[in-house]
Amino acid sequence: MADPSFPDALPGQHRLHWYVLERVLGQGGFGITYLARDTNLDQAVAIKEYLPVDVATRRADATVRSRTEDQNERYRWGLDRFIREARTLARFDHPNIVRVLSVFEYNNTAYMVMRFEEGENLAALLERRRTLPEEELLRVVLPILDGLELVHNAGFIHRDIKPDNIHIRADGSPVLLDFGSARHALGHARTVTILVAPGYAPFEQYYSSGENQGPWTDLYSLGATCYHAIAGIAPMDAISRSKGILGSTREILVPAATLGSGRYTQGLLKAVDHALQFAEKDRPQSIAEWRKELAAGAKAVARAAPAPVAGAPAAASPASLRGPIIWATLGALIAAAAVVLWLVPGDQSGKLAAALERSETERRKLQAEREREAGEKQRAAAEDKRLREEQKSKQLEAEQQRLAALENQRTEERLRRAAEVRQKEDNARREAADRARREEEARKQEAARKLAEAERLQQDKARPAEPVAPPPPRKPAEAAPAPDPFALAEDARARGNEAEALVLYRKAADQGHANAQFALGEIFAAGRGVPQNNFQAYIWFSLASLSGHAAAGPRRDQAAATLQPAEVQQADAVVRQRRQASTQRKG
Amino acid sequence: MRRKSGFATCRAGVCTLLAILASGCATNENIRAAILEVNQEFKTQYEEILAERGTRGFNVVPGEAFVGVRKSLMGLGMRLEAQDADLGYLNFAAAAPTPLNDAEWKAVAQADLGVMQRIAARHIGLPAYFIGFEPEGLEIVINATVLPLLGRTEVSLTMRMRQVKPPPSGLPRREYAPPTGVRMGLDKIWRQIASELGVRARRP
């Protein structure tokens, strides 16, 4: 059964050679990624299918085709690139780059088979923990940089780096996924589909031309990923930033150096802010350049031994150890001074005083250090509080939206119920009118029968007595012809009883009465006593026209002008069916 | 159904004229031309989709199919506006994006927004890339016909958008829903009807 959230996806258990699809892992602008099983090796794999939704679509036979003939060239060009990219990516054998195992063509498209990585993606990790300490962050970013450098050196850029595309394996090592949007950085001037992750994509990615994109594009996205891990939220998207920068020459993104002050080393924060520079020329131009900046700021942690990122608690940072060390040092100094004062004879008192003086100076220095430390902690706590409040306000806003949606739902439910009640009342009124009409008809027939009987008796009395044959028994139907429903309808309408008129017009129309069909067309066109509906008006005008009503043709064309061609075809099918049924009844 | 929150998060639906107007970079004439071309493109795709997915046959009697179609559409959140069992005609409406849910509408936005922006960009330039999909103020209207055909019943669907408020003076109405929305909506409705009737739908 196909997943309803991914209508273009192949269904579960669909077989592609020896791969059996299990479920959809995700869909992007260029294709769909499935979890599948390699039945030869009996192992899970991820398979990416080339399906650029803006130019191609899935057919019922599972093949993928360009939406129009004009788009076929563009689709084939993209397909060719997809296959070539897969072949190139398959050359990269790096522990932090997703491993491409195979590529093949099938269903008029192509499939890239990749190793399936178990674990948790960075987006989920940040959702759970909000921020990452510096050491953990570097354990994610630095290995990714190594892998990405390999890719850049081969002339590729990833173009979609974001926490969703960084996977953290169970052993804590990161792997960069989804090269589906990777495009050759050099050598093509074709327009490619815009695919951006707001917040993580730099401004140049909002334009389709790839000319001004390069390693600095991926570095912006990596910087934004670090920013998220530091601030707990993604940076403002580049379009919003552009409004600030281009509109007033004022940067409106709060720098990481402000948000992370006191919690991260200045070197790291500066490197992140550098990568997030708005203009591409102001950013680091290569991985090597940015790695140097990161390393300068955080040498102590840059190449720390691997440790689980997701599972284990973070190691204590140097800042958090500093407090106890200060106090221990201070205590030791005071104790040493006291021992010296007690042991040394009186003539050494000058030296002792100097020692005490030094000790006091040292104490004051340490005290100042402790106060600075406390101040930094306070600032960090204030920043944390602000972020928490921001989060809370967002939750409140979401809750208000949920309540508004609930209220809308209730209103709709009330309206629906009211409409049902109205419908029931209308039905009851129609039934009552119908009953009254039948009774009235019966009364009229009875009166006509009695009148005819009385006339007959009078004629019998007036005629001279002669033997005559007894009159044949008379059928009641011959006593009075059934009243014309169209005339009754006109009468009801003249009396202002629209509901009764509608029922009677309908009855006459069903008998093929052209005027009644035309009248129904007018009723639906004007919405008189019924909801206005040009589709129904069109049907009745068409039937009236076919029954020979001269004015119905132009009115039908007027109604048709308000309908879509497809709706006209749909209504024509109803008219044909109606005429066919009517002919069969007559036959 | 979390429809309102879906609006806020998903932002799917139709070209927000206000966004373009606010940009101050496009004339009414350009906007009009952009909407007309988007309408035309969506119309072409809509008719192709209808040719492929607009009609299905069911091995049930017309009366049963009629009730099944009504129950299915109402089960998907559409409200019944008109019906005529003799003609085999039903008319439903609901605030967009119904009958799609938030996640489905998000997929629609992802698939069709780019196409719309590229078309609009030909007329209004860069501000086209600030256009979003906005379903507010729009209703989805569905016509269904249920007709007997060769011993079974043929059900046919059409889908259009209806603006609750008229567009600003001089600008055309948006009438055709995004193609991916039409495709997903029809597939969802056919699944629901087939499930309601307990039979498999067949293409004509």
Image (cartoon, rainbow, N blue to C red):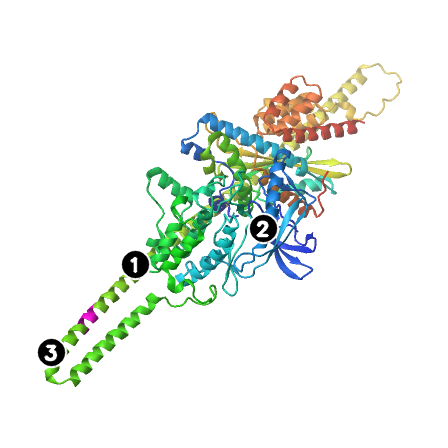
Residue A114 disc label: none
Q: Secondary structure at mark 3?
A: helix
* Residue in the image at 13% along x and 85% along y: A345
Residue A290: in magenta span: no
Q: Residues within 10 Å of mark 1 (few under 14, many from 20)?
A: some
- Dot 2 and dot 3 within a common chain: yes
Q: Nearer the viewer, residue A510 or A159?
A: A159
Residue A379 disc label: 1
- The amino acid type found where label 1 is placed reads Arg
Mark closest to the chain's N terminus, 3 or 1? 3
- Name the subunit of mark 3: A
> Which residue bears the numbered disc 3?
A350
Of marks 3 and 1, the one in the foreground: 3
- Compared across the picture, whether A179 is left or right of A256 comes to right
* Residue in the image at 21% along x and 80% along y: A336
Image location (x, y in percent) of residue A239: 42, 42
> Which residue bears the numbered disc 2?
A88
Q: Nearer the viewer, residue A455 or B131?
A: B131
What predominant SS class does the magenta segment belong to?
Answer: helix
Q: Secondary structure at mark 1?
A: helix
* Residue in the image at 22% along x and 79% along y: A335
Do callouts 3 and 1 mark residues in contact (Cβ within 8 Å)? Answer: no
Q: Quadrant of residue A229?
A: bottom left
Of marks 1 and 2, the one in the foreground: 2
Mark closest to the chain's N terminus, 1 or 2? 2
What residue span does the magenta drawing correspond to?
A359-364
Vertical side of A435 occupied by A404: above or below: below
Q: Secondary structure at mark 2?
A: helix
Image location (x, y in percent) of residue B108: 55, 42
How much space separates mark 3 and mark 1, taking CA atoms?
43 Å
